[in-house]
Structure formats: C-alpha cells, structure tokens
Amino acid sequence: MARHPAGELDDADFQVVEAPRPAPADGQVLIRHLYLSLDPFIRPMMDPVRSYVPHLNPGDLMPGFGVGQVVQSRNPALPEGTHVSGRFGWQEYIVADPAALRVIDPSLAPITTAVGILGMPGATAHYGLLELGKPKPGETVVVSAATGAVGSVVGQIAKLRGCRVIGIAGGPAKCDHAVQELGFDACLDYRAAGIEERFSALTPGYVDVLFENVGGPLMDMVLRRLNAHARVVLCGAISQYDGPTSGIGVPAFEFVRQRATMTGFIISEHMAHWPGAFEELARWIREGKIRYRESIADGLRNAPAAFKGLLTGKNFGKQLVRVARENG
Amino acid sequence: MARHPAGELDDADFQVVEAPRPAPADGQVLIRHLYLSLDPFIRPMMDPVRSYVPHLNPGDLMPGFGVGQVVQSRNPALPEGTHVSGRFGWQEYIVADPAALRVIDPSLAPITTAVGILGMPGATAHYGLLELGKPKPGETVVVSAATGAVGSVVGQIAKLRGCRVIGIAGGPAKCDHAVQELGFDACLDYRAAGIEERFSALTPGYVDVLFENVGGPLMDMVLRRLNAHARVVLCGAISQYDGPTSGIGVPAFEFVRQRATMTGFIISEHMAHWPGAFEELARWIREGKIRYRESIADGLRNAPAAFKGLLTGKNFGKQLVRVARENG
C-alpha cells in the first residue's frame, strides 16, 4: 500500500516493489504463492481508524489470505511440494513458520477452496449464520451480496436448515444464479427499480435473520422489515468501504420495537469454529448440496483492479488472483 | 387518548371521560387507583406503527402500571384493603381478576416502589444490565437518562458489580445527584457545552456497556467510543418519541470493527426474571446500597402535563401521579 486511499481506490494507492526472494531460516519454508484471495475486509484496514487490528500504513505489504506451495523447505514436516494456506499478503514468495500455515490436501478439493468456501469466507458464513443468526426452519433469512464468497454459502446453509432465503444482488445474472444454481427462494436485483416494494412483497412475514455484507440504504431497507426477535448478523458493509460512510438509517427504537439483536463479528476471533465448519462444508460439497463459483484475475499486477472490482460488485463469486501457475 | 399525537404531546391528544364506577363480577375485585406510574414506553404506543403490542387507537384508555387498594371484593383471596399493582391505566377505578394483579405488602416498602424500583422499571434495569449488558468488574458502563427510574438503578447495580459508571443527564442538579447520591463515578451534563470532548476525556479506555434510554445524537456519541466486544442494551429512545426520528448516526461497520452487540428488549417478555430481581433489589434497598427518588404529580388531570414533562426530562427520578389519597 503506497498511501491511505482517499475514498475509492486509485492505482496510486498501490505500488509494486521488487525485492530479493527471501530465504527460509532453519525450521522455516519458502512458499511460492499460487492464489491470492481478495476479500472485502481488507479495504477498511487501509483506513487509519481504530479497529480490531492495527490499520495499514503507507509502505506496508497489502495483506490477504493465499494458497501456495512449498518450494524450499528447511523443515521436514513440510516437504517441498506441500500445498499450504496462510496470511501470505500480496507477494510472490513468502517465508513462513509451519505454525502459521494450514496444510492443504489437493486431492480433497481444488486448492482455491482453501481461501474460499473451505477457508475464511466459508468459516465466516458458517459461524455467522449458525452461531449468531441462529436460523430456525421456516424462518425468513435475507443475505446481501448474495452471490459473493460469503453470501452464497450463507444462503445455501440457510436453505439446508429449512429457511426461506432471499438474496440481494446486483443485476439479473447474479440473481438468476442465486435462484437457479444456489437454490435461493428469491433474489432481489438492487439495480432494478422499485426495490422497496418488491422487497416488501417478498417478505409478508417480515425478516427473521439478516446476514449483512453490504450496509447502507439496502441494509436500512431490510432493517425496516425486521420481525419480532430478529437477529442481524453484521459481517461487512462493502458499500461503505470507499466512504463517505453514513449511519444506520433506522431509528434505534426500531430494535426495541422488534426486540432485535445486531451483532458484529470477525471470524479470526472464532478459530475454534473453523475445523468443524470445514468438515461440514466439505461434506455438503461432496454431497452436491452446496456449490461455489470463482472469479480469477491473472497476476499480482492485476490485483488492485480486481480488488476495486470486488468492492464495486463487478466480481461474480469468490474473487482470486492467480499469482503463479502451479507448474509454470 | 383522544387522537394520535402529531409529534410533541398536546393537551388535545387527551380527553377526560366520566363513566359510571364499574362493578366487579363474582371472583373479581374493584380497585381504587392510588398511584399511576408514568413510563416513557407508553409514548411510542400512541403512534400507529407495528410494534410489540397493538398501538393505541383514538378513544382507547391510556395504559400504565399502577398501585391501588381493593375497595370492594368478590374474591376471598383479596379482601378489601389489600394493596395491589397491575396494568391499571389512566383511570380512578379498575375492576380486575386476581390473576392480573400483584399483591403488595406495604410493610416491606412504600407502595409506590411497586411501580418503580420494585416494579417494571427496576426489573427492566436489573434484567437489561445483567442479562444483556453482562458487565464485568472494571468495565466502563455508560447509562443515559441516568437519574430516571431505570437509569438510576442500572448505574447503581453496575457500581455494585465493580464497574466504572458514567451517567448522562440534563443539568447540574441531576448530575450532582448521580454522583453524590447514586455513587456514579461521573455524570455528563448533556446541556453543557463541549460534551463530546468531555465524554472522550471520561472514557480513555472506551465503553464496554451502554445502557441506552435516550437515543439520538447522545447515543451516537457513545457508539463512536465503543470498546472491543461492547454490549449496547437498547431499552428506550426517549429523545425520539415525539419524532421526527433519525437513524443511528454510526455506520454499521463500526459494530464489526468493535465486534459489538446491540440488543433491544422489552421487560414484559421476561417475566420469569422479575421475582429474583425484586428480591435482590429489595435487599439492596434494605442494606442502603441502592437509593431511589420520586416525583409525584397530583391528580389524573395533571397526568398529561406530567407525562409531557417526563418525555422532555423535566422530571427527576421516578415519575408518578397520585390518583387518590389512600385515606382520602
């Protein structure tokens, strides 16, 4: 990161830096980065505000989860060729201690899933929906950014739990995908006209669970239709990351009227939940009950543009950057 | 209620209706109303919006908790002279079934406490702070409407739990009372200048629990200083009851940044909590650990003015209306 962004991301917010390939110390490994994950939560880390981690400063490496392969090992536990995942950042080679890595078995699932449905986004969806949203059969669950890496998993789990699922996404292609491929009951195209009326018509019994990834007026629209004892799971607010941010457009008393709860969370504080979530998600994938979709940009130099696209809804499914070809 | 209020309460929103004294059927009792409780939550019930109870319609009896005395009994379980509390509404005489009444022992505490600290407001403070706010020793607890029927109890319980307590109240008299009589660590006079700066100075370690009774910009000020894993207990939003209401002035993502929870509740959904709360509160009163203060208006005809005063912060402590003198 070259500088703190002033609102929407600009090419000049990033800078490519060439540096010698690092060398692993005894016990460490050198990893060649194959797939970098682009996740919306990285954007707010670029702003100098108080948050759950120290914000980035100009000159810092852009952070991010990644999947790679050990190309030089000074640790017998991780021989060369081993696939690993970790917080690699936007760089081609990483030196790491094994404790900071998760070993990936490429025979179980494509390695990209280690930063997608079987990685942070999948754990986020599983934990947030089940532990905080607590959906019950027959309840209405609304999920925004419905075809994204997190939202698509949230909606499919909610369907498996017997809920009525309404997605919110931008454009007919994503909405068709949510209904036809992901099995949502309905998907609201927020770019089409009359969204408030269409949403009201879709929620005659109001909303029991909102899994929120977007924030702003779309979130307010759902908050105005909370059911009694609704649970709002605040995962992200992608519409507000480029600022200027606005407040929640619903009076506080509405949460009293509906005895509603709103909870913000970050999944890195709930690591104990990850293994069980991945086990269940992997089983659902094997059984064909959950699907996922990826968008892959090519090369680290295209990461800023792909990241910008992710923040403005141009991606479709989990956004990755191919940093290097596995056998290239 | 003569009509739905158009914003701030007007005398013409109320109408005095004379009617014959009702007669109890077999098994019922006739109660003479002695003290009517005025509670802010009644105000939003006057607006025609979807809520936890059906809203009032023009011509409906103004609702409210009250304390009275049985003056005619057709039930041996409740002889004449028995003191009882219940949802009496703004009227002088009430016919009721014993199941809808709570018997009050006037030898244990003044009967007015049955609609105050040993009634709905006390139960609200006890449940909301302990079950939802979950304060831990050393944490910073902020309570708005700090000298009111609920806020004063919240702050004192928080002190008993070893918390640092900061009240927010209007004017030096209330703030002095909060610190000197109720034992709060500090009280912020929201009518004095520079409140944001003074609040920041008072919360160098940020805010762990906010017990919110007021809403609006004062609430937003506190939300901007939430600590990690803060709990916001939404009890009321008295500043917004006369409308027009505004949204929450803090972006949704701030709740993610601080992994904060906000929960709205109404105490009538948690009746199982009441007896234990009253037992503990009564003990604390006997032990001199908790104090309370009352404002008493005289006569039902003054109820609208006293209610308006309550909504604009003119009261001091628990607001009651003396409907009749006990031996009058």
Image (cartoon, coloured by chain):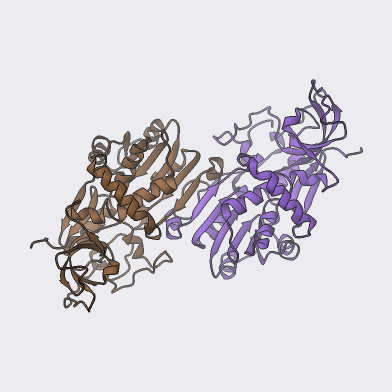
Chain colours: A purple, B brown
In the rendered image, the vertical position of residue A182 relative to residue A92, given as above or below:
below
* Quadrant where the N terminus of chain B is found in the figure: bottom left
* Quadrant where the C terminus of chain B is found in the figure: bottom left
Image position of B8 (left or right of A44): left
Give x and y (percent) for residue B272: 38, 57
> Does residue B11 show up?
yes
Foreground: B318 or A236? B318
In the rendered image, the vertical position of residue B19 relative to residue A42, given as above or below:
below
> Does residue B190 show up?
no
Foreground: A121 or A97? A97
Q: Residue furthest left?
A: B328
Q: Residue furthest front?
A: B76
How many numbered markers are drawn?
Answer: 0
Give x and y (percent) for residue A143: 62, 57
User: Can you tell which quarter of the image residue B63 is in?
Assistant: bottom left
In the rendered image, the vertical position of residue B143 relative to residue B81, given as above or below:
above
Residue at the image point whose x is 32% and y is 34% from the top:
B186
Q: Residue furthest right?
A: A328
Give x and y (percent) for residue B156: 31, 41
Image position of B282 (left or right of A147): left
Give x and y (percent) for residue B169: 30, 42
Residue at the image point whose x is 19% and y is 55% from the top:
B111
Foreground: B11 or B261? B261
Residue at the image point whose x is 45% and y is 35% from the top:
B206
